[in-house]
Image: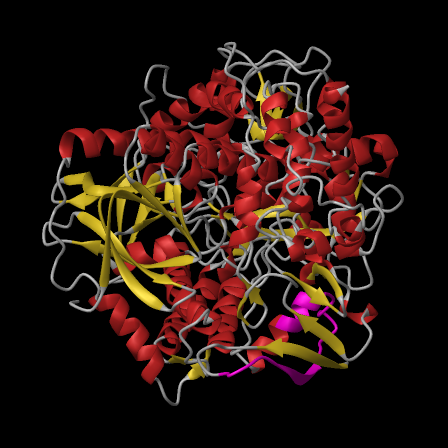
Amino acid sequence: MKMHFKIYRYDPDRDEKPYMKDYDVELEPSDKKLLDALVRLKAVDDTLSFRRSCREGVCGSDAMNINGKNGLACVTDVADLKQPVEIRPLPGLPVIRDLVVDMTQFFKQYNSIKPYVINDTVPPEHERLQSPKDREELDGLYECILCACCSTSCPSFWWNPDKFVGPAGLLAAYRFIADTRDTAINERLDNLEDPYRLFRCHSIMNCVDVCPKHLNPTKAIGKIKDLMVKRIA
Amino acid sequence: MANVAKRQFDAVIVGAGGAGMRAALQLSEAGIKTAVLSKVFPTRSHTVAAQGGISASLGNVQEDHWQWHMYDTVKGSDWLGDQDAIEFMCKTAPEAIIELEHFGMPFDRVESGRIYQRPFGGHTSNFGEKPVQRACAAADRTGHALLHTLYQRNVRANTQFFVEWMALDLIRDADGDVVGVTALEMETGEVYIFHAKAVLFATGGSGRIYAASTNAFINTGDGLGMSARAGIPLEDMEFWQFHPTGVHGAGVLITEGVRGEGGILLNANGERFMERYAPNLKDLAPRDFVSRCMALEVLEGRGAGKNKDHVLLKLDHLGPDVINHRLPSIREIAIKFAGVDPTKDPIPVIPTCHYQMGGIPTNYHGEVTIPKGDDLEARVNGFYAAGECACASVHGANRLGTNSLLDLVVFGKSSGDAMVNFIRKEQTSFKPLPADAADRSLSRIARLDAQTGGEEVAVVRAAIQTVIQSRAGVFRNSENMAKGVSEIKEVAERVKRTQTKDKSKVWNTARVEALETDNLIEVAVATMLSAENRKESRGAHSHDDFTDRDDKVWMRHTLFHSAERNITYKPVHQKPLTVDYIPPKERTF
C-alpha cells in the first residue's frame, strides 16, 4: 500500500526556515502503526529526525502532531489516517530539528510541583500501609508517561509555558495530593496558589481529548481547585 | 584530543533506567559529584515497559522466605547463577521493595494495607512445592511505576542528568583502569570527554540483535559494545531469554502476570498443553521451559491460526473485573497490537526475544572483574556495571520473571555504595586522562562522515537481526550455529562500512543509529560465537546435538574476548554467603 505523507522538516544546520516535505511511502502489510511507516520512511531518507523507543505507548517518546491532533505515532493506526498524512512537531515548544522539540520547559514545570512523596515522619520497618480503596485514588493519575501531548495541545500552556504548570504537571501535582502517604498537601496547594500556575486552566479539555493513556487532567485540576476553595472556606 | 571539551565528575553513570537511577540516588545522596548520561529522557528508558512485578519474599499473601526465593532462582538459572550473588539479591529483596514503597512507588495493596503480590513463573514455596505469590505489583505497570518513582526521587536529590547524550567509548589508561567515557551531545553533535574517578554502566539490554524482540529501539547494547571495544570480555552471551508471550507478529510483551492471575496457554486443539509438560507448575513453569514447550507444539503441527504458527493465551475466564483491575494495560495492548479484546478472545502469542542473561562480568558489588594472570576475577579499577548490561551472575542460564526489576534496584544500590566507597577511600584524586582518550570515538565518527560506497545502516542492521534470529533461536544445533558464526563474521565486515546520508550535526539520528550498530555487532558476534561453543543444553541454550546439561564440563561461565574473538572460562560461584550450597539436580516442574 502506498501512502502520502507531508512532514515538517527543519534542520538548523542546512535550512533557513522550516518546510513541509512530501513523501510517498510503500508500506508493507506489517506496517500497522504510524511509527512503522516513519521507520520505513527513515530507511529511505535517513535525514528525517524523530524520537522513538518502546513502540508500545509506554515510554512517551514519539508524541507528535498527526493530522492536526497530538498523539503517539506508535499507537496510531496508520491505515485510519486521512491522506496526505500531515505530521508536525508538538505545537508550542521550540523545534530543535524536524519532529524533535525542546521539552525543557515541559519538564521544568513537572519538576516544579515537587513530584515525589513528601513525608517527614520516620518510616516504619514495613510498608506505609494504604488500603486498596486509598490506593485506587491514584488510578488515572500515576499512569502518565510524560509524552507532553496534553500540555502542548493546551492554549493556556502555549501562551504561558513559563508560568502555567500545564495539564501534565497538574495531574502529577494531584497524584501526590491524593496519596495518603503524602503529608504536604498544604505546601503543595501553596505552591499552586497563583494566578497562573493552576488557575490558567480554563477547562478547554484539549488535554483529555489527546491523552494517549486516556487520563483526565481536567478532572484532576478541578479537584485541586476544589481543595483550594475548601481551604479558604 | 586538544579540541575535545572535557567535563569532570567524581562519578559518571551511563544509563538512566532502574539500575542507573537507583545507583544515582546512592551517589547524589552521599554528596558525590555525579553525572548521569542517557540517550533518552530517564522515564523513556526500557525499565518503563516492565509489567508484571518485582519479586521479594515479603509474605504479604502467603508464607514465604528468602531461602525459597534463592532456591527458585538457582534452579531457574539451571545452576549457572553465582550463588553468592543470588543469596545477596534474594536476602536483600524485601528491604529493597520496602524502600521503593517509602520512596512513593504506587504498589497495589491487599486488604491489610500491605503490598499486593501475585504468582509468577518458577516462583514456589517450600523449595519447588507449589506456586507462591511473590511478585509485588503495580497493576501491570510495575516497571513504569518503579522508573517514574526513581526519577522523581532523583529530582528530589538534585541528580544532574545529561539527557540525550550518547556515551560512545570507555576510556581506560595504561594500567587498564577506567578513567571516564566519551559522549555525544545529540543536540549539538559535539563529542565530550567525561573524566571520572568511577564509571557505572547501566545501559540495559541488547535485544535488538534479534529481528523479533520485546525490546525497545534503544536497546542496542551500548555498554556491551563500549566494553568489548575497550578489551573487557563479555560473559555468558549465549544465554538469551525468549519470553513465552510476545504478541504474534508485533513482538510486544504480554506479561507472565497474565498467567500469574490465572491465564492459560492453549494449542490449536484447545488443549492446555502445559499440563502435559509441567504437571506441577503448569503454565507457571520458568520461561525457558514454557517457550520450548510452545515451540514444540508449533513444530509438531498443533500451532493455532491459519499458518499454525503460534499458540493462544486465554484469559477471558478471569472475568472483566480482574482483567480491568489487575491487567488493564494488557487489555489495551491486545486490542491495539493483536486486534483482540482479551475479555472475549484469546491473544495470539509466540516466544519472543526478551532478555539478555549475560553481559559485563561483575561481582555482587557491581565491580567489573576480568581475568588477569592467575586471577580470573581481577577488579577493573573504577569500572562498575549493574542491571541487564551486567552479569553478576544472578540469572545464570535463565532468568525468573520479576527478578530483573529486583536486579536493577539491588545491584543499582550495591554498585552505588561500592562507588561511594571507592571514591572516598581508594580513588580520592583523578587519575590523568591518557593522551588518546577520545581518539577511538573521534575516528569512528570521522570514518562515518567520510565513508563512501558503503551500505545503509538499516540494511546492515537487518542483516545482523536476520542471522541472530535464524541461528540463535529457541532451539539450536551445531550445523545451524556454525553457519551463523560465518555469517555474522561477514556482517561484521559490512558494519565497518556503514554510511549515512545525513551529515548534519544537530540531532542526527542516522549517525546515532550507525554508532549503535557498532555496538549491536559486538553483541551479535559474542552471542553467536559463545552459543556455537557451548556443547550442552542449559537454561535458554537448548542444543539439539547435546541435549543434556553437562555439569562436569560446562558448569562454567563463558568469557568472550572481542579483539581475539576467543573464549575463556571462569567457574560458577558455588559458595553462597551464609547458607549451604544448593547442589545441581534435574530440572523438572
Left or right: residue B525 compared with residue B255:
left
Magenta region includes residue B406: no
Name the quadrant of the N terminus of chain A: bottom right
Q: Is residue B518 above or below residue B10?
A: below
Q: Residue furthest bottom?
A: B453
Asked whether B388 or A93 is in front, the reply is A93
Look at the image and name its color scheme.
secondary structure
Asked whether A50 or B187 is in front, the reply is B187
Residue B210 point in image, percent of width and height: 53, 61
From which residue to which does the magenta span run?
Answer: A15-38
Q: Is residue B192 above or below residue B83?
A: below
Asked whether B293 or A118 is in front, the reply is A118
Rendered residue at 58%/28% (across/down): B105
Q: Is residue B583 visible?
A: no
Asked whether A11 or B77 is in front, the reply is A11
Q: Residue furthest right?
A: B344
Left or right: residue B542 compared with residue B576:
right
- For residue B198, what is the image quadrant? top left
Magenta region includes residue A20: yes
Rendered residue at 29%/57% (across/down): B228
Q: Is residue A183 visible?
A: yes
- For residue B573, what is the image quadrant? top left
Residue B371 point in image, percent of width and height: 19, 45
Name the quadrant of the C terminus of chain A: top right
Number of numbered discs: 0
Residue B202 point in image, percent of width and height: 39, 45
Residue B326 point in image, percent of width and height: 75, 32
- For residue B43, what is the image quadrant? top right
